[in-house]
Amino acid sequence: DGFLHFSTVTCLFNSTKADDIAFIESYYLNKLKIVSFDSRVGEYVGYTEYGVSNAKRWNEGPEVIQRRNEKERYCVRNVGLDYRTGLAKS
């Protein structure tokens, strides 16, 4: 018994070009997605009542600006490394 809360961070890409990369961060409660940020949308989106209220608050605060920068900081850098590593092994 208990609750399960977890988050995921995903970088979707089909090339190393920044325009072809998306940063997605999602939060779940008991396997149900409650809120996520997608760099292609540019803001948080809520999927439950609790998620909608958090998305509204985060979109009005510094959190959304921080997440908009994550694509460059996290995904673009790591996708370049992943591409080089993957191509070197193929």
Image (cartoon, rainbow, N blue to C red):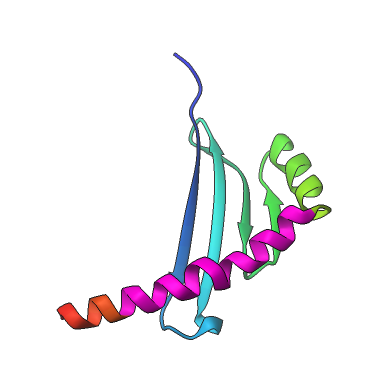
Q: On the rendered structure, is 19 left or right of 44?
A: left
Q: Quadrant of residue 44?
A: bottom right
Q: Residue at coordinates 84% horizontally, 53% vertically from top-left?
A: 60
Picture coordinates of residue 35 (x, y %)?
64, 46
Q: Nearer the viewer, residue 76 or 39?
A: 76
Relative to 54, is 86 above or below?
Answer: below
Q: On the rendered structure, is 14 left or right of 3?
A: left
**Image quadrant for the C terminus?**
bottom left
Q: Is residue 76 magenta?
A: yes
Relative to 41, is 31 above or below?
Answer: above
Q: Quadrant of residue 73?
A: bottom right
**Image quadrant for the N terminus?**
top left
Picture coordinates of residue 32 (x, y %)?
54, 37
Picture coordinates of residue 52 (x, y %)?
74, 43
Q: Residue at coordinates 55% horizontally, 60% vertically from top-left?
A: 24
Q: Residue at coordinates 72% horizontally, 53% vertically from top-left?
A: 63
Q: Residue at coordinates 74% horizontally, 48% vertically from top-left?
A: 55
Picture coordinates of residue 72 (x, y %)?
56, 73
